Image (tube, grey):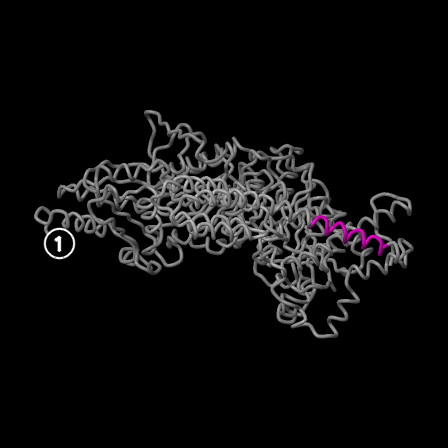
Amino acid sequence: MTAPETKQAMTFEDFRTEVLNDYKIAITSRECSLLGRREVLTGKAKFGIFGDGKEVPQLAMAKAFQNGDFRSGYYRDQTFMMAIGQLTIQQFFAGLYGHTDLEHDPMSAGRQMGGHFATHSLDENGNWNDLTKQKNSSADISPTAGQMPRLLGLAQASKIYRNVSVLPKKNKFSENGNEIAWGTIGNASTSEGLFFETINAAGVLQVPMVMSVWDDEYGISVHARHQTTKENISEILKGFQRDEDNKGFEIMNVLGWDYAALVGTYQRAAQIAREEHVPVLIHVNELTQPQGHSTSGSHERYKNAERLAWEAEFDCLAQMRLWMIANNIATAEEMDEIDNVTKKEVVEGKKAAWTAFVEPFKKEQNELVALLESIASTSVNRVFIQKFANDLKEIKEPIRKDIITVARKVLRMIVGEKSQPQLATWIKNYINTIQPKFSSHLFSESAQQVTAVQEVVPTYDNTAEEVDARLVLRDNFDAIFSKYPEVLVFGEDSGNIGDVNQGLEGMQEKYGELRVADAGIREATILGQGIGMAMRGLRPIAEIQYLDYLLYAIQIMSDDLATLQYRTKGRQKAPLIIRTRGHRLEGVWHSGSPMGMIINAVRGIHVLVPRNMTKAAGFYNTLLETDEPALLVECLNGYRLKEKMPTNLGTFKTPIGVVETIKKGTDMTIVSYGSTLRLVEQAAKELLEVGIDCEIIDIQSLLPFDINHDINKSLAQTNRLLVVDEDVPGGASAFILQQVLDVQNGYDYLDSKPQTLAAQPHRPAYGTDGDYFSKPSAEDIYEKVYAMMHEVNPKEYPGLY
């Protein structure tokens, strides 16, 4: 073996110091893993998944990792996080215990299990830090390979910053696009489609990405022979290797226990990616997993004696020790001393983390015990209440569930007694204080949140003519691209032809192929491009061609984008706009409206459903003044309908979370959205002929929903509600009813049963007849309203059937 490459000449003593420091970091990480497992098995922590066996390659990766770079990895990378100075011993254990304070667990404030890492891209007010002056880690997620699409976008941002001339070459997000996005993944997870989709896209886009595959031959208990063709991911990816005539990847192989070779490999990979913007795959072979996959089982169950003996010999720490001795860097005694000192430091760090974790609970425990003893002294149930107090006092290490459960059970015993209000107030105050520790920051809490943007109505001159609605979108996008140099759009057919409905006609020619780009048929990584670029200060619009195709990307939306602000407690954000189109096209695969599925999978993303293109354009203008992600569904059959062209393109704003009453009425409130509203309007016009006057409300956004409770105000006048939706029965209509009845207390004003009218419980059949018999028609709406009014006044509205 040879000494690792270094950026500049150093003395042997300097080199020795650096290697010893690396060794200490690796030993610290290993001891955290070993002690962390014991903490789980003794019940102090719920679950443990650790980075033991992967320490040495992560040291090498950390050496090549620079300020401004981003990591998008998985739950084995604790050594790397320690090596870049972003994870201490105490923070490691605070995360394991689930400490709800960012000061103790800066990774997620207890919202994710240990092993899920993040750095703070934002300050406490939600404003961007200077990302070029810190080492960055995008917040991890557990779903296997789920980190891959985001990785693509983090890398692509560097390409955009380097090559889009209207962007400054140096800002708080990039210095001339020199930043690398570093990905990590286990060998078994490379079996996921998200891995292959990302690898292919990175090769096409040629972005500065270094992808490390930690290969220990297993995926939990399943050997590589069941995971990967030829049992070797780099072997089967050889076709991606670049050559003189073709762009592609640089593919490298290195042994995971060879410290010197690892350092050299990572330095070369970083140089290629950083300077040439070429993606690199590093296949790190012959790694081990000394404690098995996690605390949920033992690897002795599925590894034979020969494999276990090999793992003991080729444990990367054992091999690093041998290399250090062979190269006179340290003696065995010196390393034993480091081991002993480090073990004590880890134990002390663990103790400090546990003390900080339980101390608040004990204060809350004592406070409630004192209150219960006071209540017991005057209660007819004093014996039972005192027992609750004593039992609570006996818990040596309580958690908050123990505390609040006792309080709520005692409250039942003192109903009607003088002490009831006192305990009830304590419980309410406690929940109001504690609940935000677990539930805050699902959406932005900064000054840039969507509800802070005020409506600006479109303006028109006297000569405004009606044009195809797509032109309103197109010209508004033109204004956006001119106003915001950080905005870019990409998707299937978005570039050259200006999207399938020409809403981006001419934009690529005017603003270039990087800002208005075509993408391959790969919805998950289109989303990932958007997430990663948004995390680095750009304002991407990721286009999914049709709403039905969103299902390819729903996992990324749900697990990654929707939870980002939540799982970092407001310290990372990705204000991505997802553009798609749907509703009312005739056919099974291009006209679905799975809104119920979407809104219940993507809480944390706003879901906007404008009825026309002027409303849609206003939503885009609004979103670009906010810091929150949103899905915007344009009406697929509305692009050729006529709308007037506003004069204030790029500046008028549709409010988010605010409904619009598009027709006043006295007999019935009909609530709907999107293309279905045109059918509602047609039916309402016909109902007027028989004396039924309907009020029509356009929801406009499903998430958030009617923040001013205007639907309830309408019900106060009409006393009847019909929800019309083209989703399946019980889909979005059920959500709308829940919001109106449970949140707005709409039942207070209802004189009739609230009803819904939805589509059939299947995809719409092909053709015009298929649409008519699959989704609500104007006749369906008419007859539904008429039947409701027949129930009210059968004499005036005799039955139709």
Judged by its main secondary structure, the magenta piece is helix
Residue closest to the eye, 273 or 338: 338
* 785 vs 304, nearest the viewer: 304
Secondary structure type for disc 1: loop
Q: Residue furthest left?
A: 795
Residue 462 relative to residue 355: left or right:
left
Task: Classify 98 as above or below 472.
Answer: below
> Which residue of the protein is positioned furthest toward the bottom in this rendering?
305
- Identify which residue is drawn at 80% across, 51% down: 341
Q: Residue at x 38, y 36 (%)?
A: 614
Q: Quadrant of the N terminus?
A: bottom right
Residue 2, image x and y in percent? 87, 56
Q: Residue at x 13, y 54 (%)?
A: 800
Q: Which residue in the protein does label 1 denote?
A: 800
State the extent of the magenta-drawn residues as a range. 335-350
As for residue 346 lying within the magenta part, the answer is: yes
Q: Is residue 666 visible?
A: yes
Residue 643 is situated, as x and y percent measured from the top left of the image, at: 34, 36
